[in-house]
Image: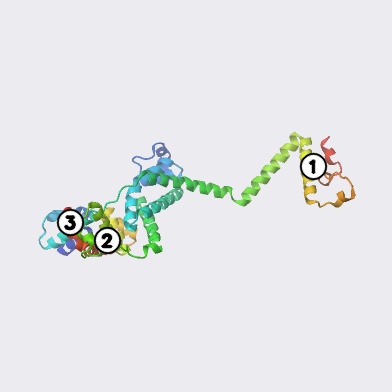
Amino acid sequence: MTTDRTRELFEAYGADPARWPKEEASMAAKKGVSAGSGAGELDEARVDAARLDSLLNLYTVSPAEMPLRASVLAVRDSAVDVRDVARINRPEQRRRRFWDLSGGLAVALRGAFPQLFGLALASMLGFMVGATDMLPIHDHGISVDASGLVLGEDGLGSFDS
Amino acid sequence: MLDDHRTSNAGDDAKDSGLGASDDTLMLLAGKGDDRAYAQLVDRHLDRTLAFAQRVLSSRPEAEDVLQEAFLRVWKKAPTWTNDGARFSTWFYRVVLNLCIDRKRKPSHAALPDDFEFADNSPIADAQLEETQASELVEKALAVLPDRQREAVVLCYYQGLSNKEAAEILSVRVKALESLLVRARKNLLVLLEGVRGEVLGDAR
């Protein structure tokens, strides 16, 4: 290793050969160059490097405290939450879930309690007719089984059989 | 060995994830939802990378923000983690460094610290410097270095990384890294010249 290269190492990595690239540190050790030893013409470079090392060593940083560690771990949990919420809140999935649930409930209700199903359906239709007032029939005092619009001519009677 | 873990031993490691497992193995386990493996990665790397970010940013609160974001990226990356020949620590240092660079691009980092004094007879130079004051002084000197020089010094000197790994993180050749280091240390000596006697009076 040349004198110039040794000077470069002092200037780049500092006075302690333990901080140098391994191969060059071992070569320096064989030549007797160390942080504490005089190296003749390299003395100035070594002393300057040692001074700066001493200064740099004064800059200390305290380790992470528990709240930071806890919040780092919590960030992971929030990442999972965000992923789940994004999936659940996707509008088309939300709508699909509602209709899947409603359809399944209606089929189950009609199979197990046909009369109750008919009553619920009639109530819903009645509410719709009343709320929208789309049918002017009421204005003329005519009564009609509105369920017939959906259930056919038998109306609610179709559930009696 | 890492590949062996990746292909066959991940399930077994899940039973006692943590002690002794490589970073790659822990990433693989974390990717499968192993909380303990992720926590082990946090314990293993939090302090060192926090110190790295703090020295690059000259701000503890911002360094903590960066680390939270960085570990969130670890968690998101874990399910698809492949080392591709790079060590986890190298990849993670890059993540942290890039987040620091993003932070420094914000306006608050555009100007030098207002209270930094170069070598002169300022009160801080004449004062009896306590250890914390000396630490802050060096921190400020580092803060006014050009970014790449500061990053090189922090990686090599403070983090103790090899020149090859530091060069890889900075995406430069080793020769270029050494050039950055030489210039950084010369600048630091000039910056601290005025207070060197005061500080080194105790430090020598």
**Residue lying at 21% horizontally and 60% vertically, measured from the top left:** B125
For this rendering, which residue is in front, B128 or B185? B128
As measured in the structure, the alpha-carbon distance from the residue carrying label 1 to the one carrying label 3 is 93 Å
**Residue lying at 23% horizontally and 52% vertically, measured from the top left:** B131
The picture places residue B170, in percent across and down from the top left corner, at: 33, 60
Disc 2 element: helix
Tell me which label, 2 or 3, sits earlier in the chain. 2
Query: What mark, if any, has residue B141 been given in the picture?
Result: 2
Quadrant of image for the N terminus of chain A: bottom left
For the residues labelled 2 and 3, say whether their Cβ atoms are less than 8 Å apart: no
Query: Are discs 2 and 1 both within one chain?
Result: no
Disc 3 element: helix
Q: Can residue B173 be seen in this view?
A: no
Crowding at dot 1, Cα within 10 Å, few <14 / some 14-19 / many 20+, comes out as many
Give the residue number, with chain letter if any, for mark 1: A122
**Residue lying at 33% horizontally and 48% vertically, measured from the top left:** B47
Left or right of A153 on screen, residue B75: left
Give the residue number, with chain letter if any, for mark 3: B200
Query: What mark, if any, has residue A136 been given in the picture?
Result: none
Crowding at dot 2, Cα within 10 Å, few <14 / some 14-19 / many 20+, comes out as many
For this rendering, which residue is in front, B83 or B189? B189
**Residue lying at 51% horizontally and 46% vertically, measured from the top left:** A81
